[in-house]
Amino acid sequence: MTSVADIMADADKPRRWGWWYVTELRLREMRGYVSYVVTSSFANPLMYLLALGIGLANLIPEGMDGVPFLVFVAPALLMSTILTIGAEEGMYPVLSGFKWHKIFFAIHATPVTPGQIVGGFLVHLTIRFTFTAGVFFGFLILFGAVPLASGWVMIPISILGAFSILTPLGAYAARLEDDTGQFALIQRLVVMPMFLFSGTFFPLSQVPDWLEWVGWVSPLWHATQLGRTFSYGAIEPMWLSATHLVVLVAYSAIGGYFMHRSFVARLTK
Amino acid sequence: MIRAENIAKKYGDFVAVDGISFEVQRGESFGLLGPNGAGKSTTMKMIAAVSTRTSGNLEVLGMDPNTDGPAIRSQLGVVPQEDNLDQELRVRENLITYGRFFGMSHAAVAKRADELLEFAQLTDRAKSKVEPLSGGMKRRLTIARSLMNDPQMLLLDEPTTGLDPQARHILWDRLFRLKEQGTTLVLTTHYMDEAEQLSDRIVVVDKGAIMAEGSPAQLIRQYSSKEVLEVRYGSDKNSTVAKSIADVGERQEILPDRILIYSDNGERDLAEITKRGHHPMTSLVRRSSLEDVFLRLTGRSLVE
């Protein structure tokens, strides 16, 4: 048989590259459902833009926030699409790796550490989100919904937004023993309201005062507002834009920290 | 390869492993034998540097698993109790991606995967999905996967649980070959025949503690007799008959379904019992096994 010397090119390699091996694995796994990812990446924006951007926009000829309705709603559509996928990826795929497929345990039996597992998982998703957001952005250009060249900044913002919801959910999902309806509840009581009350289809100022807090805690609102600034140059105070960014980074960083802790706890139990 | 001193693992108030000590030498085949829930898997996880021990000293390949986990794991092959193959990948891909985790190059993993598919007799299933494989094939694939990094030591947690007899024998044959090649094997099992087949040395564990240690033959010699006579009188009568034959053999165990008589000559004892007018429904004279050792040590049988 091949000797250890042949195989172990470098004992330090997994220490440095473990995260990438995990990404490699996830990418290879994705081959199994790549047609789903591609189809939905193209179908989603098309449906949204036809229904909301064209259909609904005709009913609002005066536009919103000083721009045509399509232009107003476009950043929100992109953000909500990517954030929704982010929420999904933070739930079942995480629990599944521990409970059903147990793939995280298999990886952890090798030199790869829990932190590298989380890292590789997130890097793979960055690649996936970039693709889906990129296609979406292409459609926005095609429909003339993004008037400014600076609109591409919405792509990294959407990925940051996705992580700001994915990592806290991932931290939670990694500690679950079983899904007895928690995920469905999160979908209905967190993700759905976020979609409805985050200044998605109309400015947050139109929401009743007592519901406005939903927008403020919602990563979607922050991502959308930031996106609007870059897309059509929505006017808001500088401090507010900075707040959007800080909130998204804070959600992602704190969520990432706890997600890592959950993975360590579960894998070294 | 392993030196464990008084290692323990507690989950809150529950003590899974209660201060056990043992050593494993290079090239040795070492078995942890005990019933389900004895703490075998937890012990294995501590050795495999994936479960942090609560107390005690543990050295694996000269390093501490609590601090040098990745380095230790890079030298180990692990076959977990439950298959955790990647269902989304094909058979060969499972080996390739796993090898990558050890930092092996793409060329090296491809070569090694083909060698191991051959070894695991799965070459013709290389492109198959994992799910339709039989239990025995999945197990062989898991073993092949654990060998990707050419490990110094192979840890096998209940390697043949849930397999049919034929699949078990194929697997034992593969493991025996590894043993012949000098791979250090550490296995847990609650099957005495598996422990006898594969281990040079065994520790018997129960309720998180070590009950006895030695080679299978030593343990049998020390804790059991040469032969065992099993007689059955039907569940109602076993205990009544037992009273009137209590002086036969060296020792007896009265189980709900049969009486075990430990002696150096089972046939002679059977003749004696029959002479006294107690004709059993069925009788069997056999060699003592580790099952008898376990029964003697704990008063319970291994598979409950």
Image (cartoon, rainbow, N blue to C red):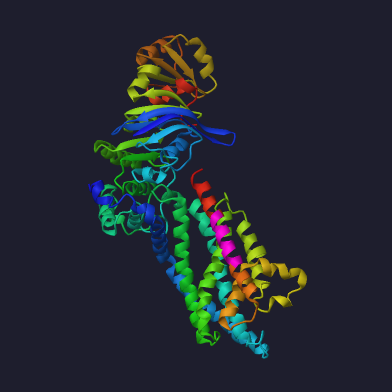
Give the image quarter of residue B33.
Answer: top left
Q: Give x and y (percent) for residue A175.
A: 57, 50
Highlighted range, magenta: A246-257
Residue closest to the eye, B243 or A186: A186
Q: Residue at x 37, y 33 (%)?
A: B2
Residue closest to the eye, A232 or B131: A232
Q: Is residue A25 above or below residue B175?
A: below
Q: Give x and y (percent) for residue A15.
A: 38, 52
Residue closest to the eye, A241 or A85: A241
Q: Residue at x 41, y 43 (%)?
A: B69
Residue A28 in magenta stretch? no
Residue A251 in magenta stretch? yes
Instruction: Tally the marks.
Output: 0
* Residue A7 visible from this viewpoint: yes
On the rendered image, what quadrant is the N terminus of chain B found in? top left
Give the image quarter of residue A200.
Answer: bottom right
Q: Is residue B10 above or below residue B102?
A: above
Q: Give x and y (percent) for residue B263.
A: 38, 14
